Amino acid sequence: MSSPAKTPPSGTVTFAQHAPVAAFPVVGGELAPGGIPVRRLAERVGRTPFYAYDRRAIDARVVALRAALPRALHLHYAIKANPMPAVVQHLAAITDGLDVASAQEMAVALDTGVAADRVSFAGPGKSASEIRRAVAAGITVTVESPLQLEQAVEAGAAIGVRPRVAVRVNPAFELKSSGMKMGGGPKPFGIDEARVPEVLDRVRESGVHLSGLHIFAGSQNLRAESIVDAQVKTYELGLSLLREWGGPVDWLNLGGGFGVPYFPGETELDLAPIAENLGKLCARADTDLGAPLVIELGRYLVAHAGVYVCRVVDRKESCGQVFLVTDGGLHHHLSASGNFGQVLRKNYPVAVANRLDEPADEVQSVVGPLCTPLDILAERMKLAHAEPGDLIAVFQSGAYGLTASPTAFLSHPAPAEVLV
């Protein structure tokens, strides 16, 4: 079980067994995203449930990354992690590029005013229409099959522009200890590395602009040594393919994979060995390729900066177990419910947001309003005693929250979102 302790002087909320949650201040015993006490914030939003994203927490993560990683490295934001327009607008100004995975995300990216050549469009199932729109916009189409390349070529000819493309490579290796494996063996993502040379030949023949290669082996990894190993292998593979290509490129995208701690026993990723390795790779890339390296991060930039807040509407006891029934649940936050890839359900860090100065000494379960036993936000956690009207906070909720959830399930109202 995990529990929020009494608020330390620093304002950090500490969870037994969970990694400390330090992204938000605490004011008067209340969680205060953006410095606003949570009950006041709920009044400002106008309803519960809601997601709140703290811009200062996002800034702090980017500043820390910039300080740790080599200056030559380009940092891109993967919009799929959190496509809220205000969040994307904020990150567009403090990162070097945006990576999108749909035409709607492309529209959000372009609405920020970012230069089109700083946007790339990945995804294994892009339609011909989406590719045409991307070519017309001037962004880089990350082709994941020979067909996608041909569709980009045809779109350029029809529109009268030279397409910008990158080739996504499915490497033969995978990112070890990865929460989600995106490369290695049969995958719907990218083009098998053995077939990439013939695709690059077609790129040369067609006359399209090759922005670079995109090699993404996996995501949500908390083992620095695994990320280092994958980045070295990715660089060597990219270098080999680009030497065979023989022409200039704008960048080599090493992917991401930086994980965040969600569950008891997990700790923050150690950036030091990753930064040291990337420094060496960037120096090599300057000599070997004359082009920068790119990493694309989504979850790592925003997960810690988001909190999901719902209100207790009932408190009940069944066979000795206390249930806090809330107005939020899996239809808003599928990941926290354990139904977004978990094999064995584990609790996200959760607290009674307006009672952080009270002892977390009562075992309670937090459930939603849906007619399904899957609607669980916290199972048998030690929390401060809560009653109807109190606010529950689910931390680490800035990534893959609202847009990864079945909001239409059982037709309950959608939650609000706010950047503070």
Image: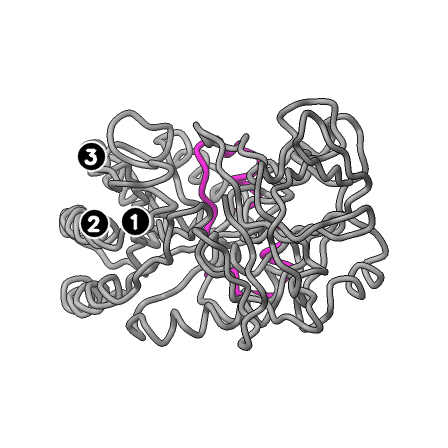
Number of labels in the image equals 3
Label 2 sits on residue: 238
C-alpha separation, residue under disc 2 versus residue under disc 3: 12 Å
Image side of residue 143 versus residue 77, left or right: left
Considering only order in the chain, which callout, 2 or 1, is on the residue closer to the N terminus?
Answer: 1
Label 3 sits on residue: 172
The residue at 80%/66% (across/down) is 40
The residue at 41%/72% (across/down) is 64
Q: Looking at numbered disc 2 in the image, what kind of residue is underneath it?
A: Gly
Q: Secondary structure at mark 2?
A: helix
Marks 2 and 3: which is nearer the front? Answer: 3
The residue at 77%/45% (across/down) is 312
Image side of residue 293 versus residue 361, left or right: left
Magenta segment boundaries in residue numbering: 107-134
Query: Which of 154/97 is in front?
Result: 97
Image side of residue 207 versus residue 79, left or right: left
Q: Is residue 135 visible?
A: no
Q: Which mark is residue 60?
A: none
Q: Residues within 10 Å of mark 1 (few under 14, many from 20)?
A: many
Q: Looking at numbered disc 3 in the image, what kind of residue is underneath it?
A: Ala
Considering only order in the chain, which callout, 3 or 2, is on the residue closer to the N terminus?
Answer: 3
Label 1 sits on residue: 213
Residue 380 position by quadrant:
top right
Kindly check if marks 1 and 2 are in contact, taking CB atoms under 8 A apart as contact: yes
C-alpha separation, residue under disc 1 versus residue under disc 2: 7 Å
Residue 367 position within the rendered picture, expressed as x and y whole percent measured from the top left: 68, 35
Residue 25 position by quadrant:
bottom right
Q: Looking at numbered disc 1 in the image, what kind of residue is underneath it?
A: Leu
Residue 389 position within the rendered picture, expressed as x and y whole percent measured from the top left: 82, 50
Residue 290 position within the rendered picture, expressed as x and y whole percent measured from the top left: 21, 67
Q: Secondary structure at mark 1?
A: strand
